[in-house]
Image (tube, rainbow, N blue to C red):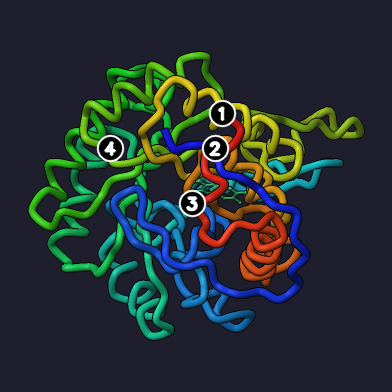
Amino acid sequence: MRDKPVLRDKKESLWRPLGDVATAGVTLKNPILTASGTAGHGAELAPYFALSSLGAVVVKSLYPTSWPGNPAPRVHNTPSGMLNAVGLQGPGVDAWVKHDLEALRAVDATVVASIWGRTIDDYATAARQLVASHASLVAVEVNLSCPNLEGRAGIFAHDADLSAQVIRVVVDELGSCGVPVWAKLSPNTDRVLQVVEAVEKAGATAVTLINTLLGMQLDISTRKASLGNGGGGLSGRAIHPVAVRTIYDVRQAFPEIPIVGVGGVASGSDVIEMMMAGASLVQVGTATFADPRAPQKILHEASRLMRGLGASRWGDVLNAAH
Ligand SMILES: Cc1cc2nc3c(=O)[nH]c(=O)nc-3n(C[C@H](O)[C@H](O)[C@H](O)COP(=O)(O)O)c2cc1C
């Protein structure tokens, strides 16, 4: 683990880049990324700001074929976050490569693809399709918070063995092109540390922490769930402390594994907090629904704050809480 940085009290208001970040098998121009499922499949945010200014765009998780998702309503606001049950709607890997990836390349975005599956073979197929399409990607994030159809619909990410099997097949498929694999884990289990250990052994270059928390809202007039699917996933401000705690605990147990932090990031201070807990890259998700420019604004705010703390590189605050 790095030595604790010395943080000086220094006022600095202008946003200036703090240099590249080399971590999790990638070298990015800064540590701010979009979170999967909150920035569209392709270049949807391009009208709001230059997507090329972010470290990377992580796109919505892709299944091998098109997938219809869940019935509406798919999102519901709560007092301190958002419930969603979009159900992983998507065009499928091949159509995404043809249309959405093209659009992202046209605006010079750095792209991380995300894949999901209902069986281990689905994940392998999606990875194989990405390789066959010669997609230009810096990393592949594997969304493990999905029900496993072959195992009574238990969630892959709640089972260390299953998670490792998925990561192993994806790493095998992607092996020929050397693209790093990030395992995106669920906070809805007390086995996070075991899962991290298993996916790292299986070849994951980094872990992305965290996906949404299980949640539900009932409409008392209809006595039914507000979301078409019934239950959903809670994201946004409410889950930020859960994300920080998960990142902190994983960093305590695993001093070296690169962590991509995500969960309720809405300010530059949230970014630095996550980095101090152990995340070397940070994704912005639900904040983007309130303001589509949020990822860029948060990048600038974090950069200003870093300068104010006397840091000259992003890595200066990494793991500072340990
Ligand atoms: C509407 C919506 C759709 C999402 N879709 C995906 C997805 O396709 N794949 C995935 O790995 N995570 C997905 N997520 C989870 C986010 O990437 C992120 O892990 C989570 O929302 C916590 O971050 P946040 O609080 O900043 O939104 C989705 C979240 C939301 C709100």
Residue at 46% over, 65% down: 55
Q: Are marks 4 and 3 in contact (CB under 8 Å)?
A: no
| Residue wearing tag 3 | 315
Q: Circle 3 — which element? A: helix
| Mark sitting earlier along the chain (4/3) | 4
| Residue wearing tag 2 | 4
| Mark sitting earlier along the chain (1/2) | 2
Q: Circle 4 — which element? A: loop
Of marks 4 and 3, the one in the foreground: 3
Q: Which of the two residues, 144 or 147, is positioned nearer the viewer here?
A: 144
| Residue wearing tag 4 | 204
Distance between mark 1 and mark 2 Cα atoms: 8 Å
| Mark sitting earlier along the chain (4/2) | 2
Distance between mark 4 and mark 3 Cα atoms: 21 Å
Q: Circle 1 — which element? A: loop
Distance between mark 3 and mark 2 Cα atoms: 11 Å
| Mark sitting earlier along the chain (3/2) | 2
